[in-house]
Amino acid sequence: MSRHLSIDIETYSSVDITKSGLYKYVQSDDFEILLFAYSVDGGDVNIVDLACGESLPEEIVQAVFDPNVQNHAYNAAFEWYCLSKYFQIEPVSWLSQWRCTQLHGLYCGYTAGLAATGEALGLPQEKRKLATGKALIRTFCTPHTPNARNPTTRVLPRHEPEKWRLFREYCKQDVVTEMAIERRLSAFPVPEQVQREWELDQRINAAGIRLDMDLIDGALHIAGAVTSDLMQEAVTLTGLENPNAVGQLKGWVETQTGLTVGSLDKETVKELLARSELPSKVRRVLEIRQELGKSSVKKYEAMVKSVCKDGRVRGLLQFYGANRTGRWAGRLVQAQNLPRNYIEELDLARDMVKGRDTEMIALTFGNVPDTLSQLIRTAFVPAKGCKFVVADFSAIEARVIAWLAKETWRQEVFRTHGKIYEASASAMFGVPIEKIKKGNPEYALRQKGKIAELALGYGGSAGALINMGALKMGLSEDELPDIVHRWRKANPNITRLWYQLENAALQAVQTCTPVGVNGCIFRREGDFATKQDFLTVQLPSGRKLFYARPHIGKNRFDSDGLHYYGVSQAGKKWADLETYGGKLTENIVQAIARDCLAVTLQRLEDAGYQTVMHIHDEAVIDCPEERADLQAACELMRQPIPWAEGLVLNAAGFVGDYYKKD
C-alpha cells in the first residue's frame, strides 16, 4: 500500500466558515463533502464526484485509515475534521496519520495560503493554484439567494454544469499545488516534535472552551440599548446624520473648535479630551465616541457566531500563526488581545449583565460600555462541575534572555526574589534594592527600571521607551538617553548578544559555515534540486527558525545588513525584508519561550489536564473541581526544560469559575 496520500476536498455548509470557524461549519446539519481529489504516492490526481453520486474507491478508503499511510493536505486540519464527520469516527483517533503542508511552509519561513505559498516558492504556472477558485467556491459551497432561474438556496452541479466541470479541475489542481509545495520543501522536513505539537494543538482546538451564553446575550442586549441611546444623543448634539462616520464627525469637530483634526482614533480622542478649552458640547460628543469604542461588542458577536451547539467555541488557536518564531496566534474571538479587567466585583457585574440591569450597572460601575468590555474575559467558563486552573509563566521572556545571554545577576534575581524591575533599577542607578520600596523616595526609580525592562531588551533606544509609554509615565525626553545608557551598562552580556547574533548571521550567510552563539547555531542551508536557500537558526530545543533567500544588502543605517524574504508587517505581502541583531534576539528569545510553553502544554496533557485555551504564556485548564490544584499546575510549569539547563522558570495563577486577568 502507498506511503503518501495527498488529498483535497470541496465542501458545502450554510455556516460561514470565515466568521464561525471550521468546527461549527462542519457540525452544521447540512454540511456535505462535494468533491474528493487524491493522489497516491505523487501519481496522477483523481477526482471522486460525491455530489453526483460517485463513491470513494474501497482501496482509497482503506488507505485513508491505514496507519502506515500519511495523509497529506494543505491546512490538513480541515480535511481531517471534515472526513472525521463523513466517516463518522472520533477525530482524535486518527489524527497522527495527518501531515499539514501549510505547516511545512510556515515552518520553513513561508507565508500561509496555498496560492501565496506557491507564488513565493516560484512554482511554475502549471503547478499553481487556479485563480478561478474563489468564485467557484462562492457558487457551489455557500448558500444561494433564490431567484427566478433557481428558486432553491443551493447551486447544484446540474444548475451550472460548465462551472461544475471547472470546479472539479480546480479541486484536482489544489492537490497538484500541494504536492509541488511538499516536494519543494522535502529537503527541510518538519521535525517529529513539531508534528506532535501540531497534533496536541488540534486536540486542544477540538476540545474547545465553554461560553457563558447568558452573559453574552445580556451584554449584547445592553450594548444595543446603550449604543442606541448614545447615538441618539450624538445626533441631537451634532445635527449629523451619522455621527459615527469619521468624516462627518471630524468635520464637525473642526468647525466647532477651529482645530485641524488628523483622525479620530483612540489616542487622538484622548488627546482632544485633555484640552481644557474644549467646548462642552464637543467634549460630550467625544466622550460618547470614546464610550462606543469601549463596548467591544464585536468580541461578543464573534462568540455568538462561532459557538457550537454544545455551547463551546472551538478553533481559537492557530498553530505556527507567527511563522518567524512559531508562536501561536488567535482566531475567531482573538483571545490573544482581550481587554483587561479591573473591576473588583466581577461576580456582581456579571449578575447584573445577565439580569440586563443597565441602570444598576451605570449606578454601580459608571461607564456601561467599559464594564461590558471588562467582562469579555469572563464569558469563558469551565464545563459544569469543573473549575478553571489558570497558570501563567512569570516574566518568561526576561528569564529566557537572561539565560541565553548568560547575564548572571539577572538569573540570580529569578532564582531568588524575582523582582526584576527593582533589581534593574538598583543595577542602573547603584541604589541598594532594599531601598526601592513603597514609601521611600528611591521607589520612583522602579518606574525607570520597569520601562527599561519592557523596552530595551531587543536593542531599543529612546524611541522604544517612548513607544512603550515613557513620556506618558511622566518621564521627560531628555532623561531617556541616560536610561538607555544605564540599562545597557548594567546588562553588558545582553547588549553583547545583539551584536554576536547579528555577526553570526552575516558570517553564516557570507561564508556558508556554521556559527554557534550560546547554544544557537546559524547555518546557510540550501538544496539545489528544489531551489531552496535559507539562513537557519537551530534553537536549543532542536527546532529551527528559517529565513528564506538570505542576502547581504544595505540597511536603514546604510551599512551592510542581513536581508531575507518574508511576509511584511505593513502590506502582508511576500517581500524583501531586513533584520538586525536586536530583532534576531527578539525572534530567538520569543521562539525559545514558545518552545518552553510547548513542552509545558504536553506535560499538562500527560498529567491528565485538559488545556482548553492558552494565551501568550498562560495555560487555561478545565478540570473537575476536585483536581483544581493550582500548585500542581504551577509545579509542572516550573519543572526544568530538558534542553535548557539552568533556565529558571516560575508560574503563578488562580482557580476560578470564569476566565479573568488576575
Image (cartoon, grey):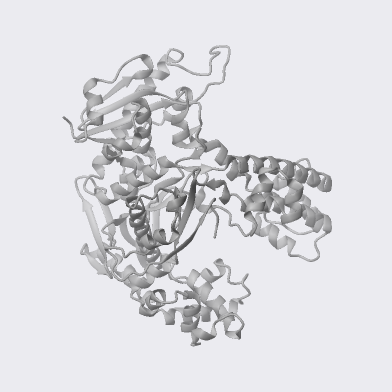
Residue 286 makes an appearance in the image:
no
- Quick one: quadrant of the C terminus? bottom right
Viewer-closest of 403 and 263: 403
**Total numbered badges shown on the rendered structure:** 0
Residue 354 falls left or right of residue 449: right
- Quick one: quadrant of the N terminus? top left
Q: Is residue 344 above or below residue 382?
A: below
Residue 248 falls left or right of residue 139: right
Which residue appears at 32% of the width and 29% of the height?
173
Viewer-closest of 197 and 578: 197
Residue 401 found in image quarter? bottom left
Which residue appears at 43% of the width and 57% of the height?
629
Residue 22 makes an appearance in the image:
yes
Residue 127 falls left or right of residue 274: left
Viewer-closest of 653 and 541: 653
* Residue at the outermost left position: 1
Measuring from the top left, give residue 148's x and y in whole percent. Answer: 58, 12
Measuring from the top left, give residue 163's x and y in whole percent. Answer: 42, 19
Measuring from the top left, give residue 130's x and y in whole percent. Answer: 37, 31
Which residue appears at 21% of the width and 62% of the height?
512
